[in-house]
Amino acid sequence: MIDNFQREINYMRISLTDRCNLHCRYCRPEVTEHVQHERILRYEEILRIAKCAVNLGITRFKITGGEPLLRKGVVDFIAKLKALPKVEQVTLTTNGTFLEQHIPDLKQANIDGINISLDTLDENCYQSLTGGKLEQVLRSITATIQAGIKCKLNCVPLKTLANQTGKTNKNCFCDLVKYAGALQIPLRFIELMPLNCNSGFTSYTGAKIRQFLQDAGYSLKVTQHTYGNGPAQYYLAQDKLHGKQSVIGFIEPIHAKFCAKCNRIRLTSTGQMKNCLYSPPVCDLRELLRQGADDGELTQALEQAILAKPLGHTFDKRPGGFAMNEIGG
């Protein structure tokens, strides 16, 4: 479907839960209250919404959270979503801590790709930043690759990482580039967006990361090849000393604003439809569903939400209130 600014909207991010087993300090601080179970969309309700979205030309879906693998039955749901007529792609974003055990079933469900969050390769720094265990994530990355499932890594390049690891900023991020390059999977650096919960954190811009890499002996060449549905600008990073090549991407919602090319809408775990990450919900699909709306009424609500999609966000004016894992493509 084409919105009022001539953008093709063909991609929906679906949050399955507000819960997460990690507490990444820049994303979601300690949470004491969660959404009540009855307020969360049931899988069959999400599938109905997805069917209506497909009728509008939305054929690509990203499953997110919180941490989506915390929700019981998630892999069966992914298989059913993938099997819907005209659905072209279903992918998953995860913190990776529970992923390894689900890989065989996700492979069986024909998942098209998995994005895994990885901000550092330092075990102590990872634990301090997230409260989790790095080893679990690294095992999950290996299992994903060995299963032949497409995989990308997402890194938020925080300025505090070097202080915690004792390394220079250049080395912190070069370690990740080398790691991803050795595995032959793309690594994306995602600029920290201003949220209500992360005012004490800042991240490096893409330009600064590129400078770090060039100072470390990498040559960078822009590539027009895309590795997903997101807005990342990709580079081929060639290690001049060892001759090895890595694929790195940059998602910069502030310093390289991409709203003019935005192709997505978002469904929250409680059934709220958001036509922009920054904007408040524009319609309550859960209420429509539970009041007996038919598919025509649901489709009309989705269409109106898309037509109301704003030209761009205004993060430069005030912070938002959502999780960082909603951002990447």
Image (cartoon, rainbow, N blue to C red):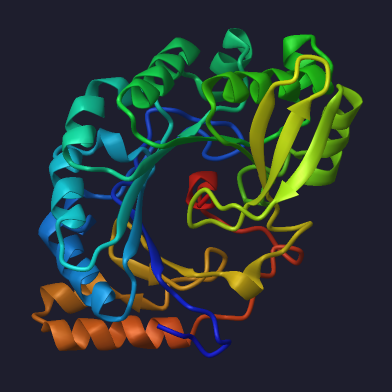
Say which residue appears at 53% left-offset and 56% top-offset: 230
Location of residue 321 in the rendering, given as x and y in whole percent from the top left corner: 55, 56
On screen, residue 182 versus residue 77, left or right, reads: right
| Count of number-bearing discs | 0
Q: Is residue 182 above or below residue 66?
A: above
On screen, residue 275 versus residue 69, left or right, reads: right
In this view, the residue in front, 170 or 311, is 170
Q: Is residue 275 above or below residue 15?
A: below
In this view, the residue in front, 84 or 30, is 84
Location of residue 189 in the rendering, given as x and y in whole percent from the top left corner: 66, 39
Location of residue 165 in the rendering, given as x and y in whole percent from the top left corner: 73, 11
In this view, the residue in front, 278 or 230, is 230
On screen, residue 134 versus residue 106, left or right, reads: right
Q: Quadrant of the N terminus?
A: bottom left
Hey, which residue is sitting farthest right in the picture? 215
Location of residue 44 in the rendering, given as x and y in whole percent from the top left corner: 11, 60
Q: Is residue 166 above or below residue 82?
A: above
Quadrant of the image occupied by residue 161: top right
Confirm whether residue 98 shows in the render.
no
On screen, residue 3 versus residue 155, left or right, reads: left
Confirm whether residue 244 shows in the render.
yes
Say which residue appears at 78% left-offset and 43% top-offset: 221
Q: Is residue 292 above or below residue 40?
A: below
Quadrant of the image occupied by residue 111: top left
Say which residue appears at 48% left-offset and 78% top-offset: 8
